[in-house]
Image (tube, helix red, strand yellow):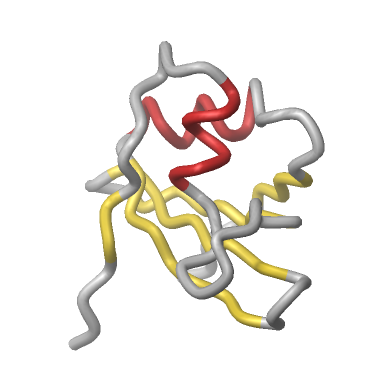
Amino acid sequence: MAVVERARFVVEDPDEVVAAATACRFCLRTAAAVEVCEDEGDGGLATCHCVACATAADLALTHEQLLRLVLRPPAGMYVVLRSVTS
């Protein structure tokens, strides 16, 4: 079972902190696109895509973090809400 890192921001954080929390772990650039999906029990999962180094990383989200990304994403970040299929 893979270990998924938890996102490190709170809903009240400014855009810069949220963007840093979803930044690429390799080159530290802001994620160009983030795909989020809701998990029925624990909140959600974000897959952060870096165009610069062609990598993706998963982050576990609380329900509040999921809503923050979907309703008020940082400037320049493209957020896609994808559905979970059972």
Please state if 75 lies on the left or on the right of 12 as rendered. Answer: right
| Residue at point 58%, 70% (across, down) | 27
Q: Is residue 15 above or below residue 78?
A: above
Report the side of 44 relative to 68 (left or right): left
Given residues 53 and 56, the one toward you in this image is 53
Relative to the observer, which residue lies in front, 6 or 62?
Answer: 6
Quarter of the rendering containing residue 1: bottom left
- The image shows residue 73, relative to residue 79, as above or below, that is above
29 or 37, nearer to the observer: 29
Residue 20 lies, in percent from the top left, at 50, 43
- The residue lying toward the viewer, choosing from 67 and 11, is 11
Farthest front residue in view: 27
Rendered location of residue 79, percent (x, y): 71, 45
Residue occupying the point 64% across, 23% down: 71
The reply, left or right, for residue 10 in relation to residue 19 is left
Q: Is residue 35 above or below residue 76?
A: below
